[in-house]
Amino acid sequence: MGYAASLKAGDYELVESASPLQLLERITAGDVNQSEVRFIEGWTFSQLRRALDEHPAIQHDTVGLSDQKSPAIDWCKRNSSGRIVFS
């Protein structure tokens, strides 16, 4: 079949009536469920991370790391008051 290289990671909704081939086609197409999280302008980095921690559909690799040790700190900057400024 050759599907192994085309599998996409994600959150998929499984329908009972779907055949194994239909499930495979959905996973290789990347037809994933999407979730929403809102970041409010002016939040601190800690507030942003708390929103990610509390979201039931989001898993991230920075759980348990301090804000200073988080790799996510590389894609944003803080102004003098500690507020986030995205780069």
Image (tube, grey):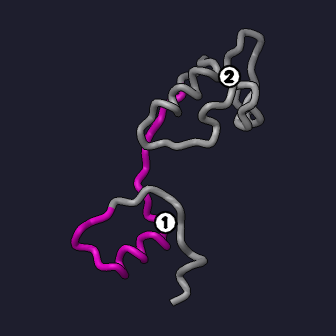
Give x and y (percent) for residue 52.
52, 33
Q: CA distance from mark 1 to mark 2?
A: 31 Å
Q: Are marks 1 and 2 in contact (CB under 8 Å)?
A: no
Q: Residue 84 bears which disc, if any? A: 2
Give x and y (percent) for residue 11.
44, 56
Give x and y (percent) for residue 72.
70, 36
Residue at the bottom extreme? 1
- Amino acid of disc 2: Ile
Q: What main secondary structure does the magenta stretch of the protein show?
A: loop
34 inside magenta stretch: yes
73 inside magenta stretch: no
Classify 10 Å Cα crowding around label 2: few (below 14), some (14-19), many (20 and above): many
Q: Residue 18 bears which disc, if any? A: none
Report the residue at 61% width, 17% height from top: 42
Report the residue at 45% width, 69% height from top: 27
Residue 66 position (above or below residue 37): above
Where does the C terminus fall, quadrant-wise?
Answer: top right
- Amino acid of disc 1: Gly
**In the image shown, does 58 or 40 lie closer to the viewer?**
58
**In the image shown, does 45 or 54 lie closer to the viewer?**
54
Classify 10 Å Cα crowding around label 1: few (below 14), some (14-19), many (20 and above): some
Q: Is residue 74 left or right of residue 10?
A: right
The mark that comes first in sequence, 1 or 2, is 1
Q: Indicate the quadrant where residue 57 lies.
A: top left
Give x and y (percent) for residue 13.
34, 59
Report the residue at 72% width, 9% height from top: 81
Residue 44 position (above or below residue 29): above
The magenta segment is 14-39
Residue 7 position (above or below residue 48): below
Report the residue at 56% width, 79% height from top: 4
Q: Which residue is mark 1?
A: 30
